[in-house]
Every structure is written in structure tokens, then in C-alpha cells.
Image: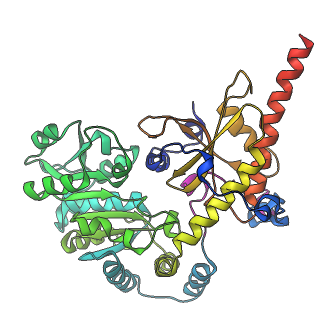
Amino acid sequence: MSYAEGNGLGRRELLWLASASPLLAFSGLPAPATAAATRAVRPDAASAKATVYGRMLGLPRIVNAAGAVTAFGGTTLSKEVTDAMAEASRHYVDLNALYAAAGSKLAEITKAEAAMVTSGAFAAMTLAAAACLAGTDKDKIAALPQASWPRRETVIQRAHSTPYDRAYRNAGMTNVYVDTEEEMLAAIGERTAMIGGLTMVEKSNQPGIISLERLIAIGKRANVPVYLDASFALTHLSDMSSLSRYTGMGADLVGISGGKGVHGPQSTGILAGRADLVAAARLHASPNPAGLGRGLKVDKEEVIGLLTAVEQLRGRDSQALYRRDRRRVEAMRAHLADVPGLRLGYEEAFFGPGLVLMWDQAEIPLTHDQFLEQMRQGEQPIAVHVVVGRTVYFVGEYTGPGLFAGYLNDGEEELVAKRAREILLAARERKAGATSQA
């Protein structure tokens, strides 16, 4: 079992690596700056219990060298976002009016007919499916998720599929999977209520994948709504244009995570698209007492936090963040470059620049799972993913732990690299000791 599987990370939380560029030689990168290579770790970065998790529960915070995955808390919030949420928490507001006003603002930003705030991208999938199943029909709304009428199928190409497709089933859909475009065209008929797509396929080179543009064209021709799961539409290096990319393509509904690269509350999301379908989705959502999504609540504070984060995207300097990540990667490389038997690859996956660590286990007797487990041990756990060659999840020809820079705090790149170095060298020393005793 891989580390990701053992810790409950799903395919979407691994598909970020599908955007991986080919392995690049480090000679193409600028030389590490002296200051970056020697900067000391901040005192609070080395303190295991210097956060509310430690004070209240005795839990150490995690140094995140993996990225914006839900299992590690998803993202970080700016002071402006948390200040806005704190202010909202001190006042009451009509929730339906708040949802409507927020939806109007998000519709402008996403360049869609309508939009709404959801309790995450999975909730957006569920509400979108419910809207396509029942529309505004009160009897059908009340019946969900037990859809007894014929038009209750979602057609999905397997290359667009993730375990999160169960969100459609949660709403009452029957998921119908196909492999080719020909099979999809044959599967679409009177029973088809929706076509499901995944925006991450744009980054994949798998043969036979139906492009997003083609998927939308198929839906238009068949008069069937197309939903695009764009939960990873934005990274921390993205700008505002990413919010409107897929509605601009003509998708009927698009679901986007409000956390991750948006840096809003991780428990928020955006559902944008056709006005009639978004209006139907609202009928299924909280605070409506009879809706399928009554439990998919979004607090007033979360709505304001999401809107604040989206507004901050306007001023995001993506190039400056990219340069910062490259400097952090170079600082890590400087600490690891002389480890005997270690090969270093430069990677730009969904979470931005990072290192891929590769070694011959005959020379460094350490499995990837053992490496990840040791990175998670001690007073300051460090979260890491493993890049696993060319599979359904990855496109690069490499295998090894990836150390990604985008979600580290200043100085933590030093801590990550030093821990990795210690673990790898200790494994070599154990091998040398065993050999000498033999």
C-alpha cells in the first residue's frame, strides 16, 4: 500500500501530479543564492507545539511539503481573510440574501450566468447532480436520492473518472462508465441526465481522452448538461482567469474548490454555470429544510472568507510566487546534492516547483514508504508525497518522494531538506555497518 492510500488520500488529491512536466536537469536552473542556502529556520518552524493544535490537544502541526490536500488541512488563509471571517462571525445576516448576493458576485467573476457558494467541490458535484436530476420539481426534490424516473444517469468516460464520482451517486444518479467517445455517444439517450467531466485531463497525455471542448460539444448536441469537476482549477500560482476558463468554454456547470489555490476556507466551493441549473441547485441546498443538501451547510463566515480570498486573487503576483518556490527548491537541492547515491529531479507539478528524490535501494536501503514514515516521525512531522512514474496518476518517467515548495512557510525548506538528508545518510550508514560486520 502506498503512503497516499494508507492515509486516505484519494485520486483527486493525487491527480495534481498529472500536470507534471518531464524530468529536467538541474543545470537549467539558476545557482542557489547563498542567503537561501544558509538561512536559519525560524524558531516557530522548529517548535512542534507552538500552535493552537499543540496547546489545546497536544498535536504537532505538520510541515507541508506535499501541497494543498484536504488530508493536511488544504490551504492557508491570509490575515485579510481571517479578519473578514472574524468580523462576519460577530453579526447576523439573512442567509438566503447572503447566498444570493455572493452568488451574483461570483457569477461576475466566473463570467457565468449564475453561481453559488457550496461547502466544497464535492458538495458542488452533489448539488449539480441533484439539479440535473430533479430541477425545480418539488416531488422529485423530495424523492432524492431515490430517483425512480428514467432520466437518472450520468455518463462518464473512465479517463475522466475519480472516486469522487460517488457525489453524483449520493444525489441519486446512476453512473454509466465508458472508455471511448464512440461508447459515450452510444450510451447517451433518454436516460441521460448529465455528462461528467474532469478538467485535470487537460494536463494528461493518455491516448483516447475526450477533450473538454469535445465533451461540451457532445452535451450541446444531445441537449444534456455537462458538469466539469474543476476542483483543482486554481493553484497558488494561478490568476483570476482560471475562475472563468471552463464556463467560458461553455460548460453547463463547473465546480471549483474554494480552498486549495484560491486560499479561501477549505470547506467552501463554487458552483457556476447556467442560471436555471444553479437556481435548481439552490433549492436542494441549505438552509432549505427539504433539500438533499440540507447538511451541506456554508456558514456566513465562510461565505465572506471565500469572497475575500477571491478578491485577493486580483492582486496575486504569480511570477513572484514562482520565483520564491524556485529559490526554496534550490535551497533544498543545496542540502541534498552531495548525498552519495541520490539523484535529484526538478518537478513542476500541480503545487509548483519541487524536487523528486531517486535512489537505488541497493545503495540506500530504504523504501519510499519507510522514507515517508520517517519524515512524519518526531516532534515536527513533515508531509511528503511519492511521485510514481507514468501511471493513471502521473505522466513523468520517474519514481520517488517529491518535496514541493509552494505550501511551506519561510525557512521550512531548510528543515525539510535537512530531515531528508539525515534519513538518507542514516540508511547508508546502517548498510555500511551491516556490511562491515559481515
Q: Is residue 68 magenta?
A: yes
Q: Quadrant of residue 319?
A: bottom right
Residue placed furthest toward the top: 438
Q: Which residues are magenta?
A: 55-76
Work out whether 388 lies above or below 245: above
Work out whether 266 lies above or below 212: below
Residue 416 is at least partly visible in this image: yes
**Residue 174 percent location from the top left of the image:** 24, 44
Quadrant position of the N terminus in the picture: top right
Residue at screen point 57% across, 81% down = 85
- Residue 351 left/right relative to 329: left
Work out whether 360 lies above or below 131: above
In the image, 328 versus 153, the foreground residue is: 328
Residue at screen point 51% across, 81% down = 315
**Residue 426 percent location from the top left of the image:** 84, 33
Work out whether 184 lies above or below 271: above
**Residue 181 percent location from the top left of the image:** 17, 41
In the image, 435 versus 278, the foreground residue is: 435
Quadrant position of the C terminus in the picture: top right
- Residue 3 left/right relative to 200: right
Residue 259 is at least partly visible in this image: no
Q: How many marks?
A: 0
By secondary structure, the bulk of the magenta-drawn segment is best described as loop
Residue at screen point 33% across, 75% down = 110
Q: Is residue 71 magenta?
A: yes
Q: Quadrant of residue 206?
A: top left
In the image, 48 versus 28, the foreground residue is: 28
